Image: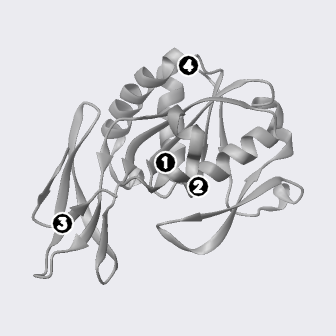
């Protein structure tokens, strides 16, 4: 468990303790924001090693994630699992993705509809293979659910889902039976207004 410290939330992420800034997303709601691309190389390497340790018993052949914040997670987890390849599901419709496999998705930190795209030339990287799907934070579960649908449409056998953090509990309902595949280094709540200019933890 963590604790509110000034305008941040102090939480254990595997073997590390970090302070995540509290960011309002509505008048009465805030989140503690983990931005992997702002955390430095050392954080990512250590967290990647910790998460790989949780996933190795699933014996994945390849690691997959979604752009953009999942990219450093996939790289470090792959490195520490001793794997050389990883797959990134794209969100930007570049010219080479014109005929890509796709799935709609929504995210708590993005206010516009998006689509996940899987380059058909990369389908062979996951088809018929054991895949560990990783991300930085699982919040609503929408992004992970879309990633699961897309990977399974490509013939992947998803054997584990790994994250640096899970947020709240809404993701469990979104993932259904697949929630049992989740392995996380830590957990954070949502935050509600305390009526006096501060925040309190909300776990449901």
Q: Earlier in the sequence, mark 4 or mark 1?
A: 4
Rounded to the nearest angstrom, the CA distance separating label 3 from label 1 is 22 Å
Name the front one of labels 3 and 4: 3
Name the front one of labels 3 and 2: 3
Categorize mark 2 by other alpha carbons within 10 Å: few (<14), some (14-19), many (20+): many
Q: Where residue 4 sits: x, y (%)?
A: 14, 59
Q: Is residue 82 visible?
A: no
User: Residue at coordinates 67% horizontally, 44% vertically from top-left?
Assistant: 148
Categorize mark 1 by other alpha carbons within 10 Å: few (<14), some (14-19), many (20+): some
Left-right relation of 19 to 83: left
Name the front one of labels 1 and 2: 1
Q: Where residue 107 sits: x, y (%)?
A: 54, 64
User: Residue at coordinates 83% horizontally, 61% vertically from top-left?
Assistant: 95
Provide the secondary structure element on which disc 2 rests.
helix
Q: Where residue 2 sits: x, y (%)?
A: 18, 48
Provide the secondary structure element on which disc 1 rests.
helix
Which residue position is annotated with label 4?
A: 58
Q: Are marks 2 and 4 in contact (CB under 8 Å)?
A: no
Rounded to the nearest angstrom, the CA distance separating label 4 from label 1 is 20 Å
Rounded to the nearest angstrom, the CA distance separating label 3 from label 4 is 36 Å
Which residue position is annotated with label 3?
A: 200
Categorize mark 4 by other alpha carbons within 10 Å: few (<14), some (14-19), many (20+): some
Rounded to the nearest angstrom, the CA distance separating label 3 from label 2 is 26 Å
Which residue position is annotated with label 1?
A: 172
Which residue position is annotated with label 2?
A: 143
Q: Earlier in the sequence, mark 3 or mark 2?
A: 2
């Amino acid at each position: 468990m963590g604790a509110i410290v000034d305008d941040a939330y102090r939480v254990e992420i595997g073997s590390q303790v970090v302070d995540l800034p509290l960011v309002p997303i509505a008048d009465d709601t805030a989140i503690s924001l983990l931005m992997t691309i702002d955390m430095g190389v050392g954080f990512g390497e250590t967290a990647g090693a910790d998460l790989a340790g949780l996933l190795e018993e699933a014996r994945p052949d390849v690691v997959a994630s979604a752009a953009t914040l999942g990219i450093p997670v996939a790289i470090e987890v792959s490195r520490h699992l001793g794997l050389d390849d990883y797959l990134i599901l794209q969100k930007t419709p570049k010219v080479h993705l014109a005929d890509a496999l796709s799935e709609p998705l929504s995210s708590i930190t993005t206010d516009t509809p998006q689509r996940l795209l899987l380059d058909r030339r990369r389908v062979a990287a996951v088809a018929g293979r054991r895949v560990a799907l990783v991300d930085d934070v699982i919040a609503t579960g929408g992004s992970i659910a879309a990633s699961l649908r897309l990977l399974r449409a490509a013939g992947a056998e998803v054997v584990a889902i790994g994250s640096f953090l899970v947020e709240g509990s809404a993701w469990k309902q979104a993932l259904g039976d697949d929630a049992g595949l989740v392995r996380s280094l830590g957990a954070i709540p949502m935050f509600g207004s305390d009526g006096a200019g501060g925040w309190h933890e909300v776990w449901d």
